[in-house]
Image: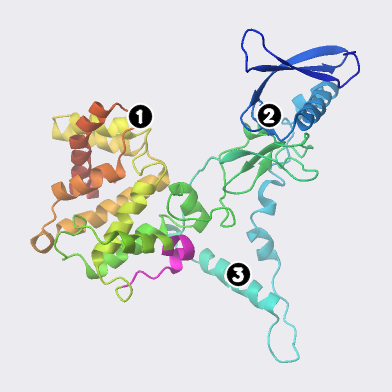
Amino acid sequence: FFVAEGSYLIRESQRQPGTYTLALRFGNQTRNFRLFYDGKHFVGEKRFESIHDLVTDGLITLYIETKAAEYISKMTINPIYEHVGYTTLNREPALKKALPVCRDMPDGKDSPEETGLEERLTSLVRRATLKESERAPKYEKVHNFKVHTFRGPHWCEYCANFMWGLIAQGVKCADCGLNVHKQCSKMVPNDCKPDLKHVKKVYSCDLTTLVKAHNTKRPMVVDMCIREIEARGLKSEGLYRISGFSDLIEDVKLAFDRDGEKADISGNVYEDINVITGALKLYFRDLPIPVITYDAYPRFIEAAKLTDPDERLEALHEALKQLPPAHCETLRYLMAHLKRVTQNEKDNLMNAENLGIVFGPTLMRAPDLDAMTALNDIRYQRQVLELLIKNEDILF
């Protein structure tokens, strides 16, 4: 009875009760697949509501891979990525060409469409006239691809070929929205341009993703908080050591997540400067990848362990080169600020050692080390931050 194309049978393993095998008839052969269940049936990365959907998707995939194997292998050789890629995501080139046409309106006012276009053009012109040093640098960023189910027919934005299957036909970048085949995702260069449509929050967002989405050198949280602290808090006793009310700190976080750079953190709203310092420290703690990244962490710890002062500074300088540009720029800006804090030690009672104790665990987190090793690293974390603050002018 098991001869018709597309016929399938599910069998429970006699040797391993609770595990199942899907036998599927295709191409005059019976193919066997290990079947799993976790509330949804799945094989590999794909999860299906029903066995029927799983089998249908499997037959589509097998048919395409069998009939178009040679075509599939050539898909990534001549991609259209350079020609299409982000034209659907980055509208600036089109805006520069679409100059507004002056037309008289009955009431003497511009149309809403023209006004909006002019505002965008004004923004573009303003950006174009910024000094080179003020422009946001071109930070490199990898795409944040996640398996995605597309509704209706969909084509890969790398190779321009059809994405087949019922569900999980390809991957989508969670930061910029680029849609590609899973195999094509390995060929896409590290040039993700995050879009604010996809980057919904400020806290807990990858640092490079945030600065690219907002077209800034550093996260706006860091810039805005430091400006506010330096304007009215440098002489505040116990700055960064004394905690603000946690509820108010949470309010600042929500304000940044909701309003971005329009968030109001002035003294009129938050009189206690410790609320602002607490919000800044929370931003660093919430980063999925710390300012001093997990990859660079060992280099910084080893540098702190050196006894010769010159060798230690040289090792720290080399360790800084391991940081992604956005991370290094953020660290540089923060260290310059903390140095200014220490210059007011007479009033705020905060020296480089005290700030190192506060910011060591905040900016550096040990990558998957055992508890004892992580505990031993705390003093080296403090030393790293102390050295970075004291030697900010020569290290960066």
Tag 3: amino acid: Arg
Left or right side of 283 for 350: left
Provide the major secondary structure of the magenta segment: helix
Choose top left, top right, bottom left or bottom right for residue 92: bottom right
Mark nearer the N terminus (2 vs 1): 2
What stretch of residues is rendered in magenta?
255-266
Q: Residue at x 63, y 7 (%)?
A: 15
* Magenta region includes residue 367: no
For the residues marked 2 and 1, what is the alpha-carbon distance in whole angstroms?
33 Å
| Closer-to-camera residue (373/227) | 373
Residue 394 location (% of width, % of height): 23, 46
Q: Amino acid at mark 2?
A: His
The image quadrant that residue 158 belongs to is top right
Image location of residue 106, percent across then percent down: 76, 91
Relative image position of residue 393 (x, y in whole percent):
23, 50
The quadrant of the image that shows the N terminus is top right
- Disc number at residue 355? none
Q: Quickly name the residue at label 1.
A: 368
Left or right of 166? Residue 119 is left
Relative to 371, does residue 161 appear above or below in the rendering? below
> In whole angstroms, how far apart are the C-alphas of marks 3 and 2?
48 Å
Q: Nearer the viewer, residue 374 or 44?
A: 44
Q: Residues within 10 Å of mark 2 (few under 14, many from 20)?
A: some
The residue labelled by disc 3 is 120
**Viewer-side label of 1, 3:** 1
Q: Amino acid at mark 1?
A: Asp
**Residue receiving disc 2:** 41
Front-lying residue, 128 or 299 = 299
In the image, is residue 265 part of the stretch drawn in magenta? yes
Identify the secondary structure beneath mark 2. Answer: strand
SS type, badge 3: helix
Q: Please identify, in this view, whether the residue under mark 2 or under mark 1 is nearer the observer.
A: 2
